[in-house]
Image (tube, rainbow, N blue to C red):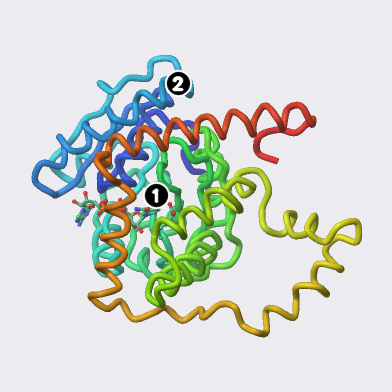
Amino acid sequence: MSFITEIKTFAALGSGVIGSGWVARALAHGLDVVAWDPAPGAEAALRKRVANAWGALEKNGLAPGASQDRLRFVATIGECVRDADFIQESAPERLELKLELHSKISASAKPNALIGSSTSGLLPSEFYESSTHPERCVVGHPFNPVYLLPLVEVVGGKNTAPEAVQAAMKVYESLGMRPLHVRKEVPGFIADRLLEALWREALHLVNDGVATTGEIDDAIRFGAGLRWSFMGTFLTYTLAGGDAGMRHFMSQFGPALQLPWTYLPAPELTDKLIDDVVDGTSEQLGERSISALERYRDDCLLAVLEAVRTTKEKHGMSFSE
Ligand SMILES: NC(=O)C1=CN([C@@H]2O[C@H](COP(=O)(O)OP(=O)(O)OC[C@H]3O[C@@H](n4cnc5c(N)ncnc54)[C@H](O)[C@@H]3O)[C@@H](O)[C@H]2O)C=CC1
Ligand SMILES: C[N+](C)(C)CC(=O)CC(=O)[O-]
C-alpha cells in the first residue's frame, strides 16, 4: 500500500479557527491550498484569518514560493478534494456530521491521498465507518494556533493501515510539525485528556468562588505554564524529588492524591457559571480585539519557540527531542 507523501496540493474542509490555521501553515510551506466551507462569508473570514497570521509566519520564515495568493476557495467538496495530495477536515465536532462528510470526501478523493481529521477526541473507527478506502484515513489533531504550534497527535482507527499512520506523520513533519503517534484509540487522545482535567478543575474553582478566571490564568502563566514549554510533568516532578528523584517524589507527594485535591467530574454548566466565566474573560480581554490578542499570542509563542530551540542547541539537542 502506498500513499502520497510528497504533497503539492493541500485540501482543507472547514475553515474556522482550526481549518484556517491549517491553511495558513500549508501556504507558508509553499503549497497550493484548496479550501471549502459551507458557511456564508466563509471565504472572506478565512482570508482575513490567514492575513492576521501571516506576520507571525513571515517572522518564523516562509518556504520559497509561499504566498497567500495560492489559496483557492471552491464551492463543492468534490472540487476541493479531487486533485488534492493531502486532505485535512476541520468541520464541527459532531460525529454524525463528520461521518457523512467523510463518506463524501473519500468518495471524491484520489484513492492514495491521505485524509486527516482535526477532531479533538472523536474516534476515527466511528467517523470513518462509511469512508471509501478507510485504510488511508487518520486523525491529525493539531493545537491552536495550528500555524505555529508543532504538536499533531496522529491516531489510526480499526481500518487504518499502519503505513498510513507513518505516511501521515511524514507529511505533517514536512509541514514543520512534531507528530506524536497515539498508539491506542481512546477518546480525547493524550493531550486533550490532560487539558480537559485541568479545564474541569478550573471551572470548579470559578464555580466554588475560590478564584476568578484571571487569577486562575495567573496561576498557570507565571508558574507551570513557563516550564511546560520545555519540560513535561514527569521530568519536572523528577527534579522536584531532589537528588533522590521520582521515587522520593512519589513517596512524599503520592499520598496527597488520595485526599483528594481534585474533583474530576465536571461541574454542572449553570447559567451563573457560564456568566462568571464569560464576564471574567471579558474583563481579562479588556479593550483588545481577538485579532490583536492573537497577534500578541503569536509573538509570545515565536519568542518562546526561539528560546527553547537555541537553548536545546546549546545542550546538543534537536528541537524535537
Ligand atoms: N478550536 C480549537 O481549539 C480546536 C479544535 N479542534 C477541532 O477542529 C475541528 C474544527 O473546530 P474549530 O475550527 O474550532 O471550529 P469552528 O467552529 O471555528 O469552525 C468550524 C467550521 O466548519 C464549518 N462547517 C460547518 N458545517 C460544515 C460541514 N458540514 N462541513 C465542513 N465544514 C463545516 C463552519 O462553517 C466553520 O467555519 C473540530 O473537530 C475541533 O474539535 C482541534 C484542535 C483545537
Ligand atoms: C478545547 N479543545 C478540546 C478544542 C482543545 C484542543 O483540541 C487542543 C488545543 O488547541 O488546546
Q: Residue at x 55, y 37 (%)?
A: 173
Q: Nearer the viewer, mark 2 or mark 1?
A: 2
Residue 182 is left or right of residue 47, and the answer is right
- Going by the picture, which residue comes out furthest to the top? 64
User: Is 91 rendered above or below residue 188?
Assistant: above
Residue 268: quadrant of the picture: bottom left
Upstream in sequence: badge 2 or badge 1: 2
User: Is 167 rendered above or below residue 67?
Assistant: below
Residue 145 position within the rendered picture, expressed as x and y whole percent measured from the top left: 40, 42
| Disc 2 residue type (three-letter) | Lys
Q: Which mark is residue 59?
A: 2
Q: CA distance from mark 2 to mark 1?
A: 30 Å
Q: Residue at x 56, y 46 (%)?
A: 179
Ligand 2 quarter of the rendering: bottom left
Q: Residue at label 1?
A: 115
Residue 100 position within the rendered picture, expressed as x and y whole percent measured from the top left: 24, 63
